[in-house]
Image (cartoon, grey):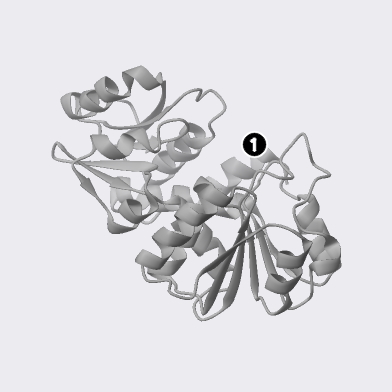
Amino acid sequence: MPLSAKTRTVAIFGHPVEHSLSPAMHNAAFEATELDFVYIAHDVLPGDLAAAMAGIRALGYRGLSVTIPHKVAALALVDELHPVARAIGCINTVVNEGGRLVGYNSDGLGALSALRNAGADPVGQNVVVVGSGGAARAIAMTLVLEAPPKKLTLLGVDSAELNRLIEDLRRAGASEARAHLLDETSLQLGLADAKLLLQTSPVGMSPNVDATPVPAAFLHSGLTVFDAVYTPRQTRLLKDARAAGAQTVEGLEMFLGQALAQFRLFTGREPPENVMRAVVEARLGH
């Protein structure tokens, strides 16, 4: 569809953004659905974020994807926050509702969608989350607010970060949430009766593809194992989990899921999942 003054613009703000798959994925979706939208990438330096966000209003952009390093800073620059985004403490999506900027976080929704599509709904289950950073916060808070587990155990290497997250989760209603430093004892105890293992740390990401935060001996066939890392698609953890008879969910599914949620927010339409998946798989490899 040719661009015109009526074309709705969506963008991604980040620094850097050259590597982002989002423009190719969303533009393919807009073309497939014959929507008069375009998605572009803007490399925004941290010191320019406030001016760039003001530009969204001035230029009438329909919305934004927000990525590193702006997810926390952008929180203070919107007019309204979705409750889940407020609880998480960062945003990755902005929708311009007639000049009023509304912030969302679709990262956790992407993970939840990936788990449900795999038949592994967290509701009422024993869940172990490895990590305590931004991905852990987004996923854990989304589970507590949207799909409450029976028991939630956080395992990480940064005690201060863990404590902050567990306090926030308890304020959000996760009275049974627990946090422990990541070691073999806490892993063994946590995974013994767990149904879901959600790995949210960067361990195992390329180029360190032989690294894993979970020894293979602790994995079992009663688990569903999700790894937020998607480069490579098949991490050491997922390979070990499959060998142990566990069900596995790739990080690609979370990345795709959050993009599908963004498409709905930007357009009010159901996304063409097969088109968006094909773009991601072509870029990352099968």
Q: Judge whether residue 77 can be spotted in this image.
A: yes
Residue 155 picture quarter: bottom right
Q: Position of residue 8 (x, y in %)?
A: 26, 34
The residue that disc 1 covers is 283
User: Looking at the image, which is closer to me, 201 or 146?
Assistant: 201
Residue 91 picture quarter: top left
Relative to 259, residue 225 above or below: below
Q: Is residue 285 left or right of residue 106?
A: right
User: Looking at the image, which is closer to me, 122 or 38?
Assistant: 122
Q: Quadrant of the N terminus?
A: top left
Q: Judge whether residue 273 can be spotted in this image.
A: no
User: Which residue is rendered at x = 81% and y = 72% of the image?
Assistant: 245
- How many C-alpha atoms fall within 10 Å of the one at disc 1: few (<14), some, or many (≥20)? few
Residue 45 picture quarter: top left
SS at badge 1: helix
Q: Position of residue 281 (x, y in %)?
A: 64, 44
Q: Is residue 207 left or right of residue 167?
A: right
Q: Is residue 194 left or right of residue 96?
A: right
Query: Label 1 amino acid?
Result: Arg
Q: Position of residue 73 (x, y in %)?
A: 35, 33
Number of marks: 1
User: Looking at the image, which is closer to me, 37 or 83?
Assistant: 83
User: Looking at the image, which is closer to me, 76 or 264?
Assistant: 76
User: Which residue is rendered at x = 79% and y = 68% of the image?
Assistant: 219
Q: Position of residue 80 (x, y in %)?
A: 20, 47
Relative to 229, residue 36 above or below: above
User: Which residue is rendered at x = 37% and y = 48% of the image?
Assistant: 89
